[in-house]
Structure formats: structure tokens, C-alpha cells
Image (cartoon, helix red, strand yellow):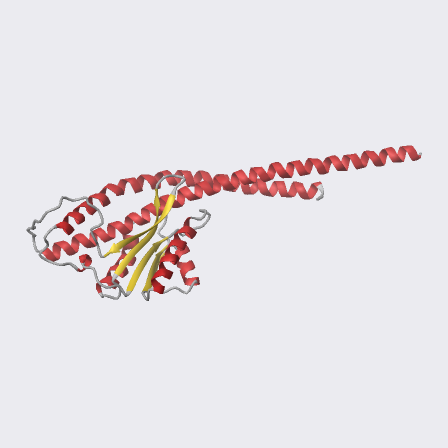
Amino acid sequence: MANTKEIRRKITSIQSTQKITRAMEMVAASKMRKAQQRMLASRPYLQRVQEVIDHLIKGNLEYSHPYLTVKPVTTAVFLVISTDRGLCGGLNNNLFKTVIAEMKRRAESGQNVLLCTVGKRAESFFMHHHANVIASTIDVGDKPRMQDLVGIMKVVMDTFDADQAQEVYIAYNKFFSTLIQKPQLDLLLPIVDTKDTAPRGNWDYIYEPDALSLLDLLLRRYVETVIYQGAVENVACEQAARMVAMKSASDNAEDLIDEFKLIYNKARQAAITTELAEIVAGAAAV
């Protein structure tokens, strides 16, 4: 059994760690509330844009935009949005597992996969695994801004425009609740009709100034909005996961402290018993 001095040192060390995890838990809780507000504030805009796009897809368009055209797939681009920092449980690992599984499935079918990453964790992970990373953005922060993501957006859309890839997917963590965050892998380009959100029928549109200019602007804005929403959702997931992870770490530290206190008391009691026995034995000898 370890001596009492060593056990006291361990208890002190765990208590210091517990103070840090509790502080990080409170900071994450505060940031999570702000991240949720930003996420919920941007969701209605994305939903409205999606409704407009769905309505356009069902219409009788006079111009076939490349973003609405489905082609045979030989290469796909995966835009992976992760965190810049760790200590958020298995949030990033679950997302990476989903992406890796899809990459293996496409490799078996003879398709190539190009990667664009947002966040240090995704960049280091896929670089370590020697994936084909064509662009990366880091240090987006807790408050993602559209201008911080413009570079990666341009790379994704330019790759699709040049027909270097025929599909673009976005991978991120979607926020459902404080305890539930699920990895998502959604098709970003080409834009296809997957929901029955607009009335059916045949109709035409009158474009001003022209169909090419209007559709190009609208569809690019849609792609930018989806990517921005993915980044905002991922930040909310990050703070929620970090808060839960730090609370779990604080609770585990408390259990360890109780366990070591019990061991310390037993060691102290054993030392006192030994000393009493030596005193009694000495008195008896005298």
C-alpha cells in the first residue's frame, strides 16, 4: 500500500485537475448558449432558401444550370467541418468514421474522393491518413463568419464548375440537443429534389435580367448558406459535447478523490495501529 504522503499528493493533483474541468464546463455552457442562438437564428433563412430551390427544381426551367445537372460520378468532393480544439468527447471521431466509411465504399466502386477540411482536427486527421486534401481552413473560431469560409467555398465550387468532381458532399455534426449530436453527410451538389415541399405542376418563370445570371447567383448563395449553416451547427455541437465531457471528467475526478481518501484513511489507520503495537510491545519489554 502506498504511503500517506504519496496518496495526499495524488489527491491534491486530482483536485487541481477537477478545478480546471469544472471551469471548462462552465465556459462551454456559456458558449453553448450563444452558439445555439446563432444556430437557431440562421436556420429559418436556410429553410426559406431551400424552399425556393425546391420550387425552382420542380419548375419548367428554360436554362439547365450545372448545379442542377446530375452526371456520372468518377470523383466526389467531401467538405468536412470539424473543430479546431479537442476535449469534446467523440464528436470529431464519430464524424471521421462516417467519412472514412463512405470513402472506402467509393474507393471499392472505383471512384476518387477529394477532401476539403474546415478545422485543425480534420486537417491533421486526414493528412495523417494521407488522404487527398486539396484545401483547408483553420481557426474559424466560436463565431463562424461568412468571410472566413469564402476561400473553402470557392475551392469547392470551382472544383465542381471545372468538372473535376461530379458530386460534392458536406460532412458536419448536426445539433439535436445538448446530449445528442449526430454526424451528417449530405449531398451539396448537384442539387436534387429530395423533398416534397413545393406544389407539383408545370410552370414557367420570367427572369430579370436573365435566367443565367439569376440562377447562378441564387444557387451559389444556396451553397454558401448550407456550408455556413454546417459550420454554425458544428460549433454548437462542439460546445455541447465539451460541456458534457468536462462534466463527466469532473464527476470522475470526484469519484477518484473519494476512492483515494478511503485508501488514505486505511493507510493512516494502519500506520497508527502499527505505532500503537510498537509502543505496547516496548512497554511490555520494559
Q: Position of residue 50 (x, y in %)?
A: 21, 47
Front residue of 41/59: it is 59
Which of the 4 quarters of the picture holds residue 160?
bottom left
Please give left or right for residue 239 compared with residue 255 in the image: left
Q: Is residue 14 above or below residue 193?
A: above
In the drawing, does residue 151 fall left or right of residue 63? right
- Residue 87 on image: x %, y %: 46, 48
For the C terminus, which image quadrant?
A: top right
Q: Is residue 12 above or below residue 140?
A: above
Q: Is residue 134 visible?
A: no
- Residue 98's spot in the image, x, y percent? 38, 54
In this rendering, does residue 6 appear at all? yes
Residue placed furthest toward the front: 109
The residue shown at (27%, 53%) is 147
Residue 37 x, y percent position in the rendering? 31, 39
In the rendered image, the residue lying farthest to the right is 286
**Residue at image location 32% in from the left, 58% down from the top:** 78
Q: Can you say which quadrant of the picture contains the N terminus?
A: top right
Along the viewing direction, whichever of 118 and 197 lies nearer the viewer: 197
Horizontally, residue 78 falls left or right of residue 14, namely: left
Label total for image: 0
